[in-house]
Amino acid sequence: MKTYKIAAIPGDGIGGEVISAGVEVLHALASRDGKFSFSVDEFDWGGEYYKKHGRMMPENGRDLIRDHDAILFGSAGHPEIPDHITLWGLRLAICQPFDQYANVRPTRILPGITSPLRRVDGPELDWVIVRENSEGEYAGVGGRAHQGHPIEVATDVAMFTRTGVERIIRFAFRLAQSRPRKHLTVVTKSNAQRHAMVMWDEVATQVAAEFPDVTWDKMLVDAMTVRMVMKPESLDTIVATNLHADILSDLAAALAGSLGIAPTANLNPERAYPSMFEPIHGSAFDIIGKGIANPVGTFWSSVMMLDHLGEKPAANRLMAAIERVTGDRRFHTPDLGGTARTADVTAGVIDAIHGANA
Ligand code: IPM
Ligand code: MG
């Protein structure tokens, strides 16, 4: 029997609550299937660790998770620690050295969930956003000088390499090709940003030639927000830079009904390093410890993890269980307007996995 080694990093805020729900569901799936199991190692990295040790993860942290099959991540963000420290000290300290350059964010309106868009209740909104996850505006290049003086200067340089752009656009074309509509929208801001974004457009045109069966179009990021709201059915697969896709994916999650549901995969497609799976909702300190965090984002991220591990039937079973549960308002947590608790949703999904409420 195959045993998958999973590194669980709950992180901060509600991360602990949703990751323990996720791990429970993974074990339930394994026992239902009987063909594989999970061995989960938990790492207590994050804000509390920082308060004790002055860093978000140990210096050899990456060595400790390097040989795991996948990483399940909760969230990073702590009210007492500046956001750029929690981000660069943990999430980016894993994503960038592990070359998880493809950040994949599917968005759909799940059964029972209401979109804030009128007349949109399902098939009209079915997207996957591919976010460049290794460079661009998150390259970390820049600096500050003369701090506190009137002549203070600060720069954040967005850095794009042809290799980086080419590999993410090729990844997106391949993903678009695997989906029924075979359509890709390439998002840039190549009217105002006249160097790197123009290179994106050129690379897109070159890579497109390798995918004659995929139709594609280009959008400027500002106009893209309008198209997402006004013509959601015209979109399918979307590729954008690190920052543009960060913003568009929050909009996408909101249009699909709740940030509490949206999943992410940080993929190293070449599998030289483990990939990392996480809900996009963040640490949500306002509801910490109340037992009402929506675990669906973590469950859906676990579907993406199972897919990546090659356990397609289990991935499909979990997705079906999630949809059965979101379709039943009794299992809606407060972010969806309900009164269910994390434990209720988890129990509902586990029952569905075992076919109890089929
Ligand atoms: C995301 C988040 C992060 C990001 C934050 C928490 C730094 O917004 O995953 O979309 O900007 O990458
Ligand atoms: Mg974001």
Image (spheres, helix red, strand yellow):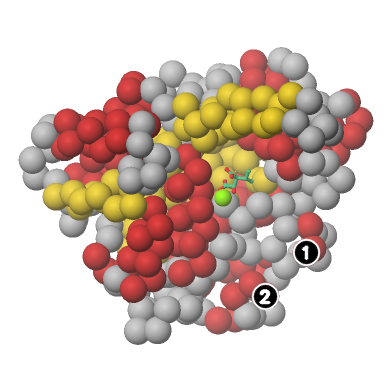
Distance CA(mark 2)–CA(mark 1): 10 Å
Q: Which mark is residue 287?
A: 1
Q: Residues within 10 Å of mark 1 (few under 14, many from 20)?
A: few
In the rendered structure, the answer to whether residue 297 lies left or right of residue 49 reads: left
- Residue occupying image coordinates x 72% and y 67%: 292
Q: How far across and down, in percent of the image, does residue 112 sit?
A: 46, 78
Element type at marker 2? helix
Q: Quadrant of residue 57?
A: top right
**Side of 205 where 32 appears, left or right:** right
Residue furthest toward the right? 52
- Tell me what residue is drawn at x 82 percent, y 32 percent: 149
For the image, the number of numbered tags is 2
Q: Are marks 2 and 1 in contact (CB under 8 Å)?
A: yes
Quarter in which the C terminus is drawn: bottom left
> Is 48 in front, or is 4?
48
Residue 11 occupies quadrant = top right
Q: Amino acid at mark 2?
A: Pro
Near mark 2 (Cα within 10 A), the count class, few <14, some 14-19 or many ≥20, is: some
The answer to whether residue 287 is above or below residue 8 is below
User: What element does badge 1 sit on?
Assistant: helix
Q: Does any atom of ligand 1 lie closer than 8 Å to the CB of label 1?
A: no
Q: Residue at x 74, y 24 (%)?
A: 145
Say which mark, if any, is on residue 334: 2
Kindly tell me whether mark 2's CB lies below 8 Å from ligand 2: no
Q: Is residue 17 left or right of residue 220?
A: right
Q: Position of residue 56 (x, y in %)?
A: 77, 30
